[in-house]
Amino acid sequence: MKQFAELVKILGTTTKTNEKLEALSDYFTTANDRDKVWVIALFSGRRPKRAVNSTQLGTWCMEAANIPSWLFVESYSTVGDLAETIALLLPEGEMLFEDESLSYYIEKLIGIEKQDEAIRKKFILDCWMKMDYSQRFVFNKFITGAFRIGVSQQMMVNALARFVKLSASVIAHRISGNWDPSTTTFDELLGEEHALAIDHSKPYPFYLAYALEDEPATLGEPGEWQAEWKWDGIRGQIIKRNGELFAWSRGEELITEKFPEYQVLQHLLPEGIAIDGEVLPFQNGQVLNFNVLQTRIGRKNVTKKQLQEAPAAFFAYDLLEFDGNDIREWPLIERRKKLEEIVQHFRSVNSNFPIHLSPIVEFNSWEELTRERERSRSLNSEGIMLKRKSSGYQVGRRRGDWWKWKIDPLTIDAVMVYAAKGSGRRSNLYTDYTFAVKDGDQLVTFAKAYSGLTDKEFAQVDSFVKRNSLEKFGPVRTVKPELVFEIAFEGIAASNRHKSGVALRFPRIHRWRQDKTVEEINTLEDLKNMLETYGK
Amino acid sequence: MLIEFTDKGLCCQQGGFYIDPWKPVKKAIITHAHSDHARFGHESYLCHEQTLPILQLRLGPQHYQTLKWNEPITMNGVKVSLHPAGHIIGSSQVRVEYNGEVWVFTGDYKTENDGISGQFEPVRCNTFITESTFGLPIYRWKPQEEIFTSIRQWIRKNRDNNKTSVLIAYSLGKTQRLLKVVAEAAENIYAHGAVYNTQQALLNAGWKFPEVKRVTADIPRDVLQQSVVLAPSGADASPWIRRFLPYSVGVCSGWMQVRGNVRRRNVDAGFALSDHADWNGLIETVKLTGAEKVYVTHGFQSTFSRYLNEIGIDAAEVKTEYGEDEAETNAALADEQVEQPAPTEGSDLSGDVDQNSETSKRSDPL
């Protein structure tokens, strides 16, 4: 555990990719196999089931530290991270010299999952008392989940590639998908001899595009490029192997059961196939606003009503595997041809076939495509995807062959009315803001945003918040409505959960309008007009 | 009230003086030389004898009077004495007694003995006015030796990797505390101009410290890579630091206790070394004074006073202009301090070790 705590410490403080990579490969070279498996699992978002919840952890910490709950809350709001708050508040431990391994603690944790609360409490307290601060921190971290400590999955794959005899893409493939770290050995996961054995559920690592920042003309000949609509849904893969159907999200979550619409594919699709595409709400030949699908995501079981109100289709972009063969190295144009053949065949025989071809946008010149792109919003699309016709299907986010060319976001000028402290890196600054528009002489809140300012601007706004607080509600302060910001967002939908009656998609601060006063901000009427225009 | 909280600062009407006033007054008693406590423009200054040389450096010729610790004087029937606060060189608590009633103002203080600032001495009193910079239970310091060990390890690791170790620490206080520690791990210690000038003032006053050289353009790269550079807060965000490439930056400050602060500063290492009392130190001190009434100033005043009330000690919060809001003292990001090749009088002592120098500058009448 000391070794793992040290690793997390380095990953959490160093700002240099090389140092992180080095710390990770040092760890993988020296740690025992069980621990390695768990580190791979934790850093790729798999964590042991929650044996205790955050409330219990907090309560036990308050007892051990002998502090009242309001003081715990104050501390938490200053630190911004529960695991860290607890690690800082606990009294000095016994500092034993023995050190148990990472897997020892995790497996014990799994073991107590079904035990009485008293047993679980005793276990947690015993563990805490044996640990120092940094061990307590990582221990709390994997109990509370969300192991976001500045290491990407790609970086871990690169570190692994330094010492296992597999290529980065094979590693990425091997550690994706549905495997259980408590029953999988390191050799099963990444052993040389298993590189060839196929786990038939596994999706391919997704190929992601960077945003096109220059004019499309910089890409060269229009004829070398294929244009598609950029859809705003859940990027996913549909796979059929060994007679089984698997639907994966880009977050590598298995979503097969969340989309019963796709079940028919188990019988229809040919064996040995993997299709890349987008899960989209779709009805009467129209792609709907993504907001419609939001009501379904996150539910384990989908109701009939939801199926009717938010029916999901799969818009196919690409074919990655056909007839059991990995065809990612084929040129895009060949893969697309094959994909069209398959999808068109099934669509012609079965009108309920849930896979659609994501249409290609025809164009002869960049000017023509620029005009086409103007139509995006009316189709509930976010813009255009540009893919080089000769490109293979690569791994991860790459420059060069695929670009996303998004339409400019919608924007609205609003005033900041509430501020709360951020978390993590921003835990002592007021960086989370709520914004309002005018409604007559009232202000109506309509969005929260956490990003879009530079560190320096955040520091300036933070200082404004501290000097202009009107009231304090727990961690939130009401602020004199004075600072005006331009809020950008990708979409707008009606919502009865918000006072303003609208919900925005991806709101963020576009810029700070220091040139505007609160008198000049937009109105609720403006928002409603936008809803009318774009919210369908 | 023997000491009143006025818009000019803490005021003893009966004795005819103020303590650490933030607006010009006739008679100012100064707890220590950090700029949010020792301001320009008073007619006369009374401070501890060790504070004098730094005040002179900062404020120039003024009407000064000094005292030793535990050396009472009487001002209009009010007995006044200074007592070690352990915060920085010369830092003192002020004890005020009139008609048998005793008030104590701590200024800034730390309870751990750093070997330079004098051992903090709890003073029995009826009313105690305490700072609360780190008045939250998440702030409990490790023993300094433990932190020193990690600083030395960090320096050695950088040296092995041919990197300059740039340590960010305030020029008055933390720097002096670090010099001996750093000297054990590095042959050469260089300093930013602001740090260097403070050192000179202290050396002239007869203090002994390991040798510190001023950073100049002609230091060979291979020497720098084996060395430690001491610089004030803000230097790490200025172009000045680029001359040390490749380097590693470490910040010494109590705020580094929280990971988010280390990450927000975007530095390579944070050492939670503070010149303020931690949570346990604050509580312990309050109890040792035996005070019936406690006023809590700059820092987490509402949290700390609420806690004291809950454990049966009558406490109230007081707003002062030292360090301002607890979080504001921490907003080092807004700190724009850059290179000061030839610090002019008064500009070389940025604020308190753990406080944002911009805050201090803004509220400073200079």
Image: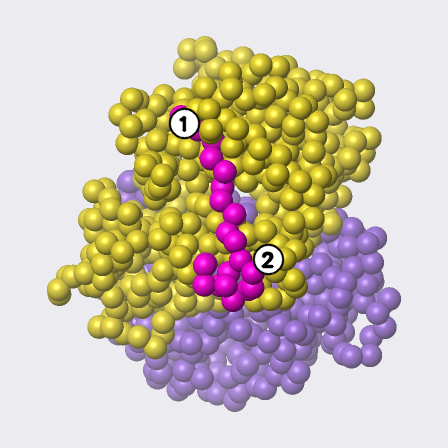
Chain colours: A yellow, B purple
Indicate left or right for B293 with B36 as reference. left
Indicate left or right for A89 with B102 as reference. right
Q: Where is residue A211 in the image (x, y as percent from the top left)?
A: 56, 56
- Residue type at mark 2 is Asn
Q: What residue range appears in magenta?
A: A352-373
Q: Position of residue B101 (x, y in %)?
A: 28, 59
- The question of residue A173 being in magenta is answered with no
Q: Mark 2 points at which residue?
A: B266
Q: Indicate the chain on which mark 1 is placed.
A: A
Q: Does residue B247 appear anywhere in the picture?
A: yes
Q: In this view, does B175 lie above or below B280?
A: below
Q: Could you classify mark 1 by the number of other residues whose Cα lies within 10 Å: few (under 14), some (14-19), or many (20 or more)? A: few
Q: Could you classify mark 2 by the number of other residues whose Cα lies within 10 Å: few (under 14), some (14-19), or many (20 or more)? A: some
Indicate left or right for A306 with A238 as reference. left
- The question of residue A353 being in magenta is answered with yes
- Based on the displayed image, in which of its 4 quarters is residue A43 positioned? top right
Q: Is residue B51 above or below residue A325?
A: below
Q: Which residue lies furthest to the front in this view?
A: A348
Seen from the viewer's position, the closer of residues A206 and A3 is A206
- Residue type at mark 1 is Ser
- Based on the displayed image, in which of its 4 quarters is residue A286 positioned? top left
Q: Name the residue under label 1.
A: A351
Seen from the viewer's position, the closer of residues B49 and A521 is A521
CA gap, disc 1 and disc 2: 56 Å
**What label does residue A318 carry, if any?**
none
